[in-house]
Amino acid sequence: MTVHQIHQHRELRSPLSWTAHAACQDADPGLFFPITWDARPSLPTDQARRICQACPVRPACLDWALSTGEPDGMWGGTTPEERRRLRARQRRATA
């Protein structure tokens, strides 16, 4: 294996290699990381969800957020509370 092939292999295996293809790259971070989820109107959340719905890496994004326990932001089209419920369901299913 050449050095170039090793480098490419590492990039593919990187846990965040999917971020280069995320639809949210050029979006306002405030849509995905509001100051609080309760105090903001639903408009930013709706806008973020629309971006996530069209994202080619949404499943990888959600999987990453669930597996790392990401507590903040919109990831894979889910809010922190939605991810807490998904993780709880996952724990019950494996128990």
Image (cartoon, helix red, strand yellow):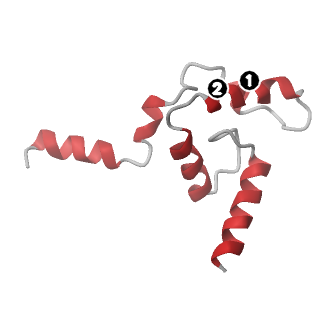
Answer left or right for 37 relative to 25: right
Please report contact status of discs 2 and 1: CB closer than 8 Å, yes or no. yes
Q: Nearer the viewer, residue 82 or 25?
A: 82
Q: Secondary structure at mark 2?
A: helix
Q: Quadrant of the C terminus?
A: bottom right
Instruction: Give the residue furthest to the bottom.
Output: 95
Q: Nearer the viewer, residue 68 or 42?
A: 42
Badge 1: residue crowd in 10 Å (few <14, some 14–19, many ≥20): some
Q: Secondary structure at mark 1?
A: helix
**Residue at 31%, 44% in the rendered image:** 12
Amino acid residing under circle 2? Ile
The residue where tag 1 is placed is 47
**Residue at 55%, 45% in the rendered image:** 59
Q: Nearer the viewer, residue 90 or 79?
A: 90
Mark carried by residue 51? 2
Amino acid residing under circle 1? Gln
Q: Position of residue 3 (x, y in %)?
A: 11, 43
Q: Position of residue 50 (x, y in %)?
A: 69, 26
**Residue at 54%, 26% in the rendered image:** 23
Q: Position of residue 93 (x, y in %)?
A: 67, 73
Instruction: Using the numbered discs, state the Cα–Cα distance from disc 2 to disc 1 in whole angstroms.
Output: 6 Å
Instruction: Give the residue furthest to the left.
Output: 2
Which quarter of the picture shows residue 11?
top left
**Residue at 77%, 58% in the rendered image:** 85
Badge 2: residue crowd in 10 Å (few <14, some 14–19, many ≥20): some
Q: Position of residue 79 (x, y in %)?
A: 75, 43
Answer left or right for 71 relative to 1: right
Which quarter of the picture shows residue 87?
bottom right
